[in-house]
Amino acid sequence: MLYPENTRQLEAIIQKARETKTPLVAVSSRGPHLHGASENPNAETVDFSRMNRIIKIDRRSRYVRVEPGVTFDMLIPEVRAAGMRLNIPFLPRAGKSVVASALEREAVLIPKYQYDYTDPLLTVEAVFGTGDAFRTGSAAGPGTPEETRADMVVPWGPGCIDYLRFFSGAQGTMGFVTWATLKTEVLPALTKLYFVQAESAEKLTRLASILLKRRIPDECVILSRADFAGAFAMSAEEEEKLLKALAPWTMICRVSGFDRYPEERVSIYEGYLKDECAQAGLEAVTELGGLPGLAEKVESMIADCDRRETYWKMRRGGVRQIDMLAPPSRAPRLIEILENLRCPGDFGITVQPQVQGMAFRIECSVYFSGAPEEAGQVDKALEDAARELYEAGAYFDRPYGSLSKLAYAADPVSTEAMRKLKKIFDPDNILNPGKLCF
Amino acid sequence: MALSAQAYRELAAIVGERYISSKQHILAGNRVRTPEIPFDYHSADAILLPGSTEEVAAIVKVCNKYGICFVPFISGTLPDAYANRAGTVLIHLKRMNRILEINEEDRYAVVEPGVRHVQLYPEVRKRGLSYTAASVGPGGSVLANFTSTSGDHHTQYGSSRSNRYLLAVEMVTPEGEIIRTGSLQGGCGWFCPDGPGPSLRSIIKGYFGSHGQLGIITKAAVALDACKGPAEIRTEGVSPHHRVYFDSDLSRVYVFNYDNIQNVCQAMLALGEAEVCSTVQKYFYLPLTLLMSDSANDFWKKWTSGYKEAMSMPLVVHIAAQSVREREYEEKILFDVVRETGGKRLPEELENWWTEHMDYFMVVSRLQSVLRLGGGWMPIKLGADSVQHICDVGESIGEYIYEFTETGKIFDAPENYQIIPMEYGHFAHIELLFMWDRTNPAAMKGVAEFRARSREEDLRRHFHAEDVGCLNPTLLQLGPLYSNCHIWMQKIKESFDPNNVANPML
């Protein structure tokens, strides 16, 4: 294991690895590692846990700059203390690296703030597989980060290349990121949480699409009964109670007011929310049965990471996941396929509108004991499901493990173009080899 | 170098004799036509009009075979869209002008390069949708604005720059291969620009486009937003004396003048934090007075009779709400912010111009009137960063521009820059537009001096006031200051264009 403390050390590590032809894999989150991107048996691990500085929190221009070892449990309170909030995934692991999460294009909870799929990631400094450091977007220059007077927040460029997109979704195959700038938003002065329940996911995806097109809610996520219960129950007993009380699907959404006239904004936006629900034949309610104080608990939990001793997705001992993107028109069919999944253990589905409702990230998690024989069966079931999902139009935009074969099979010419780029930035193929199409 | 007869025959076999020409009178009409460009441009050896992606790919393969350079061409508003050396053909994409799909549910449109804003915008508007149509006028190519130019737009405060809305694309590489990006690469349609894994989208457009140096984009999907304003638009009169109205209680335009850019900055940030208003922009007063004028004489009359002072630093605000109540709520916050930051509302006769020209907030139909004076003009800086940083850049202009405005080297309009915030004040873009007397042969020297001085001042201050462009001599000069990006761009260019035929500029 190698533990760089700064960019210079990382450059030296990569240059040395080039000389010795030693493959490297980066890890920046604390375990458990659910997707396997940071595990590579053929590579030496570069652990970023010592690069854990919060470099800057800027309230005026609304951003943070952090090193990859900064985790959600560290950053969320600091950002909140500055009067801001991060656009975080749904109940992320406390020990998950904030930078890794953004690089992996993990779904975020407030899609109205997301203008494209890389949002809230703005700029990064990274070291390519050549051993050269580079900064993206308006962090590129002029001059060094110490010299520039820019806030280094604009994601595009420098020049006619969108370098940020080489690192996004790359599973550390193009370069290792040494810091990242992420967008933050103003902490609302007032919020109101709503639940919308439905028998079918389709009703809720259609509703979410309309709400997001009008940019009505802040947080917006759709959960199957199993995922809602698993996420918010504090014990097996509570989970059981929730499973009995909940409809098959629940959408959680929240409207906000800011410093100026917050009550008025909340009132206007909850009016829009209720109107759209009524038109869809649904009802937005502020309370749910099943557990006392559930609404308060949900509201507090969705603004934070999962601080429980055992991460909620690991409550059965093991978890396997498959996730995909779909446009609104295709999401219901893909969810239907997942609802018919046959495998050991139980499973939940989380559906998150992204990019102002222009797509959904659909994530299916299978919860099982963790026993190896069960794991094999679950993997097989998910592989079979993946083929069916792919046929139905699922887009595996961040393909982990065996999914990469499916994802890259459709267009060999474009895949070859991707390999050309890899060769430029990692000519010796030392960064996380064997992942993706490299 | 004229094309060899054999090369010409092979190119003609691809598009047909009707769609290729090397006749001098045809080529003459397709030479660079921006008169203030101070150097000679070559004529292309031939011009081709392909009708499909496959034809473009076949042309590119022939170009590689014979070492012929090629330049893709559509709107022709940039000098890079013309031949810059002998042995070049222009690939004019105007026949590829189909709107291939407007998907209302998934909110995107797929277009070919020849589709103009005047084609696409009305089609999406009548479906209750809209997009960030770059401020180039109705004749601009939608695809070029999203993929090749900066694509900045007056309304990007409440939305964003075109970069954010470019979805999957299809592109012919410099060697003639057809590649696809994002979900299209994954075989899943047009909706997503990214992945699988890292994105080929990275070589389609950075801050600017590659101007054909990394390939020719033949189809692109652009994301569509909800329409801000009524679907029905009332018009009166005949262009250029027409009026465009939004008859709606949900729409209001207000314009305030400021005397200090830092106060403008504060107003932009405060409105952004409250997430109110659809458009917030510090506009430039010289083009604004030109837009308001019916003739050059009319301009001079207005400019010298108070318009310059009344609109020296105008903050233009468009509220496009979803209900009257929301509009009133946004107005309340707007007036609070303006009061706190020292803005003064424009006189009614000036402010009313905006409500009569609501095309400004869609596709600016009067844009060409800013050229009415007939002089030379040039936009510079064009960079983006935080609102605060960009306002600091704007503030610094006053420290060196007077040497040029007061000596007549450039038009006397020292505050003539615009700042457009994006994503509710997360970023902002700056454009400093200066004009000069094109009939004065000595003027070009002053223009070159001012351009160089502006860059020098920004570099000295370490301002990110401009970004670098595609692979050209300026990139080689500035690249070392911008993370050595020139080295990486050269490597990418060499890898994708080993014969260096795709619009080479070095």
Image (cartoon, coloured by chain):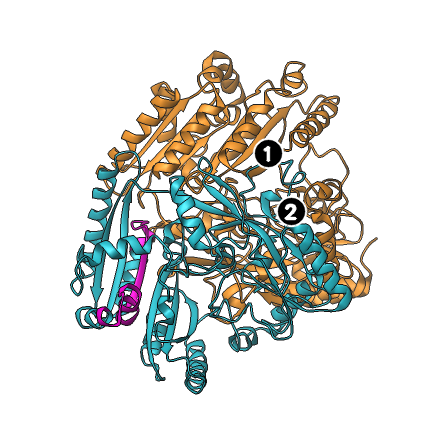
Chain colours: A cyan, B orange
Hey, what amino acid is under mark 1?
A: Arg
Report, in whole angstroms, how far the alpha carbon at label 2 lies from the one at label 1: 19 Å
Ranked by sequence position, the earlier of labels 2 and 1 is 1
Looking at the picture, does residue A408 appear above or below residue B479? Answer: below
Q: Could you say which quadrant of the image residue A208 lies in?
A: bottom left
Please give the residue where the numbered disc 2 appears in the rendered image: A159
Furthest toward the front, the residue is A309
Callout 1: helix, strand or loop? loop
| In the depicted structure, whether residue A408 falls above or below residue A274 | below
Q: What label sits on residue A149 in the rendered view? A: 1
Which type of secondary structure does the marked residue at label 2 adopt?
loop
- Determine whether, in the image, residue A229 is placed left or right of residue B122: left
Q: Residues within 10 Å of mark 2 (few under 14, many from 20)?
A: many
Q: Residue B302, relative to residue B242: is it above or below? A: above
Is residue B253 covered in magenta? no
Tag count in the figure?
A: 2
User: In the figure, residue B357 lies in which quadrant?
Assistant: top left
Mark 2: amino acid: Gly
- Residue B207 visible, this angle: no
Q: Which residues are drawn in magenta?
A: A211-238
Q: Chain of mark 1?
A: A
